[in-house]
Amino acid sequence: MGKQRKFVFVLGAGASLGAGAVARVQAGGQVPIPTQASFWPTLLRFCGPTARSEIEHFLFRYFLGYERVPAKLNASERAKKLAGVDVEEVFTFLSERARAPSTASQAKVVMNRVWGTLVQAVGEVFRRFPANAATRSTYDRLRTNQIRARDAVISFNYDTVFESSLIKGIRWAYAGIENTAQALPVFKPHGSINWTMRTDSRIVRGKAVVARPIIIAPTHLKFVSYTNSGGGEVPVPMDEVIGYLDQARDIQTVWAQMEEQMRAARALVFIGYSFPSADLYFSSVLRSVLASRGANPDVVVVNPDAIAIAERLQRRFAIESIVKYFDLQQYSSASRKDVIRQLEQ
């Protein structure tokens, strides 16, 4: 363990928020990048009218128990009602119902259509949150003070705030789909709004605008096959892909290489990642990593709710001590030596 020096940084939605990612709106206003509590209001505010209507109808029907969206509610009132709908539960529901044998054919068509609309909306909306002066400053401090060439970054975010905030002189590449030799490997196990799939089913980094990005559902059902069940490996048309790990071999490579990086890490640093209950698949990966090592890695949690998250981690995993930071700005300004000193106490 003493020879291991690699740090693996795991970025959740709170990382982009903590770094200062915002969308510009009229009259000079700003909208913070969404997390769980603000996901649906933000998505529905920025997506097109057709997508908004379909997503609202689906959420009101299946998650709020309405036959249709109440006509008496204005946009603000609708957003307030939808704010409490759990994002991961929606993804789980779509994933499970789209492939469950008991789901009627007509219902499967609905689930696949809503999924396609949601994926496109996620791409359109998160592109409104580019790198800015605040995110560049924060991530430059993080890179300078904490990240070393031997390290790796895992981002569960669909947005590209982290990558876009890195200064041009920093060499980085998307691990699993690009060559990371002599570059900082950036793993995106849930996909990215700037990824697209070629006709040969290989995933590549696309332009800033991708009509249909690669989105992996943040659920425990990632392992469910999207191939047809009648035997053979005949794929479901891309319009019906529901966001599973095997929608492309490259996605499986991302997860496999990510796990290897975690096994080799001296420390796992969770920034703005709260271990959502729906994403049991990543928790199972972490559990496998811990069981395969001679000694557990050190753990750092950077989150306003660091105490609660640390307690949750220690209840679920065999992790003895966790160093806690309550603010990304505070952590990115600290030195790596300071963090290691705390880990060794």
Image: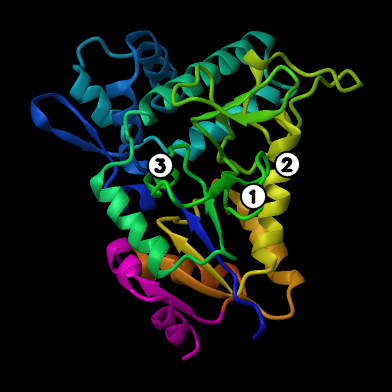
Residue, x 29% and y 64% (percent of image)? 327
* Alpha carbon distance from label 2 to label 1: 17 Å
Q: Where residue 110 appears, x then y in whole percent?
A: 56, 12
Residue type at numbered disc 3: Ser
The image's mark for residue 164 is 3
Which of the two discs, 2 and 3, sits closer to the camera? 3
Give the Cα distance between marks 2 and 3. 24 Å
Kindly identify which residue carries mark 1: 180
Crowd rating for badge 1 (residues with CA inside 10 Å; few <14, some 14–19, many 20+): some
- Which of the two discs, 2 and 1, labels the residue nearer the N terminus? 1
Which range of residues does the magenta coloring cover? 320-345
Question: Do residues under tags 2 and 1 come within 8 Å of each other at their CB atoms?
Answer: no
Residue 275 seen from this side: yes
Residue at disc 3, secondary structure = helix
Above/below status of 152 relative to 179: below
- Nearest to the observer: residue 211 or residue 98: 211
The amino acid pointed to by label 1 is Thr
| Residue with the mark numbered 2 | 252
Does 65 sit above or below residue 31? above
Residue 227 vertical placement versus 343 (above, below): above
Disc 1 secondary structure class: loop
Residue at the spot x=64%, y=86% of the render? 2
Residue 137, located in which quarter of the rendered image?
Answer: bottom left
Crowd rating for badge 3 (residues with CA inside 10 Å; few <14, some 14–19, many 20+) = some
Q: Earlier in the sequence, mark 1 or mark 3?
A: 3
> What residue is at 46 percent from the left and 91 percent from the top?
345
Q: Is residue 250 magenta?
A: no
Q: Earlier in the sequence, mark 2 or mark 3?
A: 3
